[in-house]
Amino acid sequence: MTGSPRTSRTVTVAVVQAAAPLFDTPTAVARAGELIREAAVRHGAEVVVLPEAFLGGYPKGLDFGMTVGSRTPAGRDLFRRYHASAIEIPGPEVAALATVVGELGCHAVVGAVERRGGTLYCVALFFGPDGYLGLHRKLMPTAAERYLWGQGDGSTLQVVDTGSARISAAICWENYMPLFRTAMYAKGVDLWCAPTVDDRDAWQATMRHIALEGRCFVLSANQYLRRDALPSDVHPVQGDEPGTVLINGGSVIVSPLGEVLAGPLRDGEGILTADLDLDDLARARFDLDTTGHYARPDVFTLHVDESPKAAVTSGG
């Protein structure tokens, strides 16, 4: 006796490509809420991804007066402004977005810069119908980001179960870390969110590779940022011509077999959407599950320390 064909499970997703205001956090929060609402209401998105450092801003082209062995007073004051623009978690900015996402009944992943004391962290915030769900702190800031942002630890390798799919985030060049990817694949990630500011063509190859390697959908949201979106009193190394493009997007959505479903989006802001057939996950994992039937634990193993690391602990 043959049963009736199983109805496929689908989820509509959106990646938002937009500029993040620098040194204007209230505007950034309001804009994030508007963009999430547009993606959910106009495009029917159930999962929405915003770029890296959307709240707090990504200071592309600014050097903060930093050279090896030397800092300047002007650079220190620029960092003071950047520090003041970051958000505390929990805090009013997180609460505001939690309210928006809760009203919409969707899920969202939002890039932000977190302030904890004197240290800033690049983070991905997770929201759902129940509000704020947690965060992931970028494990390794890239190059000059290291004098702006601290390192996260293994305690925030966050995975959110929406009831239909498992969502995670890898921020920008974390996507180039093979052991990070392996650790997250082992958590059964279905929707791999990649907030970024990497606008190079090579990024597209990485997104398709992760989709193929992890047999997951990849949702990469990048910024589109021009010089005229920055305050007039800061001077990026790319120059002060208002139309100079500092970050040229490249947002993309990829299937578990590496097929580009939407994008890459270039030369402007916009929202990419796709209707994902979640049964494609099982179809893709038929012949490759890198931490399952395609693993060789007798040869290779990975130990992941997910305990929080505090600089100071107190004991009796």
Image: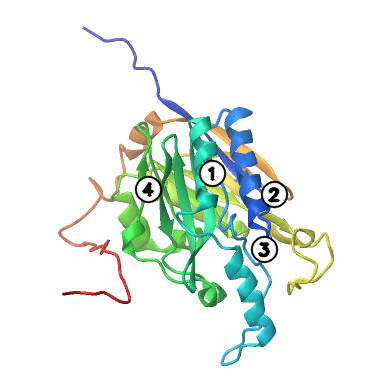
Q: Marks 3 and 4: CB-CB under 8 Å?
A: no
Seen in the image, is 22 located left or right of residue 105? Answer: right
Please give the name of the residue rendered at 80% of the width and 60% of the height, measured from the top-left corner: 228
In the picture, the quarter occupied by the C terminus is bottom left
Q: Amino acid at mark 3?
A: Phe
Q: Nearer the viewer, mark 4 or mark 1?
A: 1
Residue on which disc 2 sits = 266
Q: Amino acid at mark 1?
A: Leu
CA neighbours of label 1 inside 10 A, class few (<14), some (14 to 19), many (20+): many
- In the rendered image, the vertical position of residue 294 relative to residue 53, given as above or below: above
Residue on which disc 1 sits = 97
Residue 219 in picture, x, y percent from top left: 51, 44
On residue 23, which mark appears?
A: 3
The earlier-in-sequence mark between 2 and 1 is: 1
Residue on which disc 4 sits = 214
Q: Nearer the viewer, mark 3 or mark 4?
A: 3
User: 221 or 22: nearer the eye?
Assistant: 22
In the picture, the quarter occupied by the N terminus is top left
CA neighbours of label 2 inside 10 A, class few (<14), some (14 to 19), many (20+): some
- Residue 8, by quadrant, is top left
Residue 47 in picture, x, y percent from top left: 49, 37
